[in-house]
Amino acid sequence: MTVIDLRSDTVTQPSTGMREAMAAARLGDDVYGEDPTVNKLEAEMAQRLGFAGALFVPSGTMSNLLALMAHCGRGDEYIVGQQAHTYKYEGGGAAVLGSIQPQPLEVQADGSLDLAQVAAAIKPDDFHFARTRLLALENTMQGKVLPLAYVAAASRLTRENGLALHLDGARLYNAAVKLGVDAGDITRHFDSVSVCLSKGLGAPVGSVLCGTADLIAKARRLRKMVGGGMRQAGQLAAAGLYALDHQIQRLADDHANAAYLAEGLRACGYEVEAVQTNMVYAQLGDRAEALKAFAAERGITLSAAPRLRMVTHMDVSRSQIEQVVTVFGEFNRQ
Ligand SMILES: *Cc1c(COP(=O)(O)O)cnc(C)c1O
């Protein structure tokens, strides 16, 4: 039985074309800066997103950490969403390893941070306070896309207040495809951007951090310090290059499948939040564990949470989504 895994878009297997590109990659020692395929990926990402430099790293967590540590020093502060990945799901790395104080703010229903709250959280230059240095946004945020006008307003606010602006763009391309814009139209408002190749883009490993030449030089030093310097990493970079060339536009299929799933579940009587990209949130309440077990017996892997997240990706087809709707319907009728 083929398992339908809806826990995350990180579960994808490299496609055949991607595996071929990986096998054929030209390699060198990237710590010496000599891996041609890593160098090509970094140049390609920098060019696509409009930055002077880029750095290939093993994970999105490391990419965000290096960005925060490159922007902020000991005793500095960054403003971030209470529900943001950098704050909530990265082990407190910025505080633990960077001595950077987070100032979390509640994320709004649309995935944004209220800019009036951000402005109010910026601390005056006073030795009682940490130095507010950076605002970190996330796009997509739980599947929600930040409007371009909002991003532009956030950029103006940070510039006026001498802050840097970082984007956790783990799913930047989902946002770009949804908006129908070039990813660079989003990233040009930021001082640094982290993009995951291993989410919906379908690569097995890797993220890329983009920024100014100076920021990337700092991040490169920090990457070595935290053990992220990789040697013949070109095989992984080749997967990323393949994803950029072949697996961006197809994200629209994931979005259509997520919308279809949400509609189908609503028709079976489930309460489902509005869908923008590849994430579907359904209210299961205390039935989450039972549904997880019921679905597992029928070849569907789910998380178990009262607010259940399901993520569509390249290894789940429309007909498999139809099966999922059928199984949810059976569960509701038993
Ligand atoms: C997955 C994810 C990350 C981190 O990526 P890893 O490669 O798993 O460390 C960062 N931010 C967001 C929004 C993510 O979804």
Image (cartoon, grey):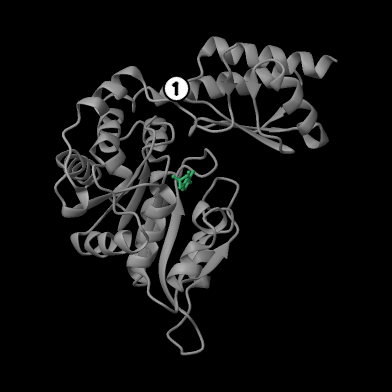
Percent across and percent down for residue 314 are: 44, 22
- Placement of 297 over or under 181, stated as above or below: above
Q: Is residue 332 visible?
A: yes
In which quadrant of the rendered image does the C terminus lie?
Answer: top right
Q: Could you tell whether 219 is left or right of 99 in the image?
A: left
Residue that numbered label 1 is attached to: 314
Q: Could you tell whether 180 is left or right of 212 in the image?
A: right
Which residue is found at the position 47% from the left and 40% from the top?
145
- Placement of 241 over or under 296, stated as above or below: below
Residue furthest to the bottom: 127
Which residue is found at the position 46% from the left and 72% from the top?
100
Q: Is mark 1 within 8 Å of ligand 1?
A: no
The amino acid on which the numbered mark 1 sits, given as a three-letter code, is Met
- Placement of 173 over or under 74, stated as above or below: above
Which quadrant of the view contains residue 4?
top right
> Quick one: SS at disc 1?
loop
- Placement of 325 over or under 55, stated as above or below: above
Percent across and percent down for residue 68 are: 39, 63
In depth, the one of 84 and 25 nearer the eye is: 25
Percent across and percent down for residue 152 are: 36, 53
